[in-house]
Image (cartoon, rainbow, N blue to C red):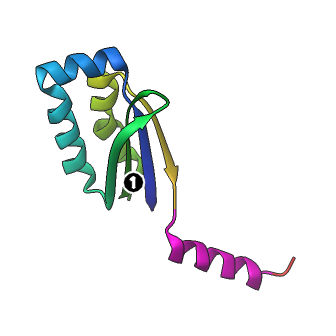
Amino acid sequence: MRVMLRAHIDTTAGNEALKSGSLQRTMEKLLKALQPEAAYFGLSEGVRSCWIVFDMDDSASLPPVLEGLFMELGAEIEVAPVMDREGLERGLKAMAATPG
């Protein structure tokens, strides 16, 4: 299933991680584990943030992958199922074909 992870990084923890080099290491480890389709980094709600789209086969894989964001960066995290344009078109066609 395609999902999007959104993480807001705590400013104090992010500053310390940036100075120590652990911000880069944590992100590299996360991206290596997720092998994302897309990853974006910027500001949201006034803090360092990232949006990462990846395929998830088993939700049990999330705790070990996301723990670095919590422990190293004090991040607030959301993970939600998403679809691309083709997925939306398939879903809408399936709805149109269903009576009711």
Locate residue 17: give its quadrant.
top left
Residue 28 falls inside the magenta stretch = no
Q: Is residue 94 left or right of residue 52?
A: right
Q: x and y percent of residue 53 in the render?
A: 38, 55
Q: Is residue 58 above or below residue 67?
A: below
Q: Is residue 21 left or right of residue 71?
A: left
Q: Residue at x 52, y 73 (%)?
A: 85
Q: Is residue 50 above or below residue 22?
A: below
Locate residue 14: give its quadrant.
top left
Q: Is residue 27 left or right of residue 51?
A: left
97 and 26: which one is in front?
A: 26
Q: x and y percent of residue 36 in the render?
A: 30, 57
60 and 40: which one is in front?
A: 40
Q: Which region is colored magenta?
A: 83-98
Q: Residue at x 19, y 49 (%)?
A: 32
Which residue is denoted by mark 1 in the rendering?
58
Q: Quadrant of the C terminus?
A: bottom right
Q: x and y percent of residue 6 in the render?
A: 44, 41
SS state under label 1:
loop
1 and 31: which one is in front?
A: 31
Q: Residues within 10 Å of mark 1 (few under 14, many from 20)?
A: few
Q: Residue at x 25, y 56 (%)?
A: 35
